[in-house]
Image (cartoon, rainbow, N blue to C red):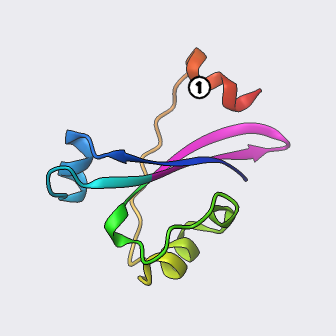
């Protein structure tokens, strides 16, 4: 697994609905790449409401497993996770992650 980058953004309409957020609530987002036999295989985009964090982790600290990030920086335990896997062909914009 390789931690790529992290940033803050305003939650879009779809994220607001899914996470039941208030208007103008910021999201802490970070991307990871998972490898299979040294080949980039999965690009993951994590989005967590900023107000959940007691402390914002550095990019290096984001290399931890997601449950550990939530525990260490949000002081919460994950009860369950919901994943959506969407198979797609990488767009040119996304190809830079795999080069």
Give the x, y percent position of residue 97: 68, 32
**Horizontal arrangement in the rendering, residue 77 relative to residue 58 (left or right):** left
Q: Is residue 90 magenta?
A: no
Give the image location of residue 96, x and y in percent. 68, 25
Horizontal relation, residue 41 to residue 92: left or right: right
The quadrant in which residue 66 appears is: bottom right
* Horizontal and vertical percent position of residue 17: 17, 50
Q: Please check the rendered image and state whether residue 42 is part of the magenta-colored stretch, yes or no.
A: yes
Q: Main secondary structure of the magenta part?
A: strand
Up/down of 68 relative to 85, above or below: below
**Location of residue 51 (image quadrant):** bottom left
| Direction from residue 51 to residue 41 in the image, left or right | right
Given the current orientation, which residue lies at the most extreme top position? Answer: 92
**Above or below: residue 75 compared with residue 87:** below
**32 horizontally vs 87: left or right:** right
**Which residue is at 55% across, 72% downward?**
69
Residue 75 vs residue 81, the one in the foreground = 75
Q: Which residues are magenta?
A: 29-46
Please state the horizontal and vertical placement of residue 30, each as a whole percent of the image.
Answer: 53, 50
| Residue tagged 1 | 94
Q: Is 86 placed above or below 19 here?
A: above
Q: Secondary structure at mark 1?
A: helix
Which quadrant does the C terminus fall into?
Answer: top right
Q: Tell me the residue at 14%/51% (across/down).
A: 23
Residue furthest out toward the left: 23
Kindly identify the residue that appears in the image at 51 percent across and 31 percent down: 87
User: How many discs appear?
Assistant: 1
Q: Residue at x 48, y 74 (%)?
A: 55
């Amino acid at each position: 697994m390789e931690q790529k980058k992290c940033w803050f953004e305003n939650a879009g309409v779809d994220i607001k609905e899914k996470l039941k957020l208030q208007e103008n609530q910021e999201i802490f987002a970070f991307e990871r790449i998972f490898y299979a036999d040294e080949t980039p295989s999965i690009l993951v985009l994590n989005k967590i409401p900023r107000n959940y964090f007691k402390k914002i982790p550095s990019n290096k600290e984001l290399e931890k497993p997601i449950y550990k990030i939530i525990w260490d920086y949000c002081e919460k335990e994950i009860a369950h996770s919901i994943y959506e896997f969407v198979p797609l062909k990488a767009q040119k914009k996304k190809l830079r992650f795999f080069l």
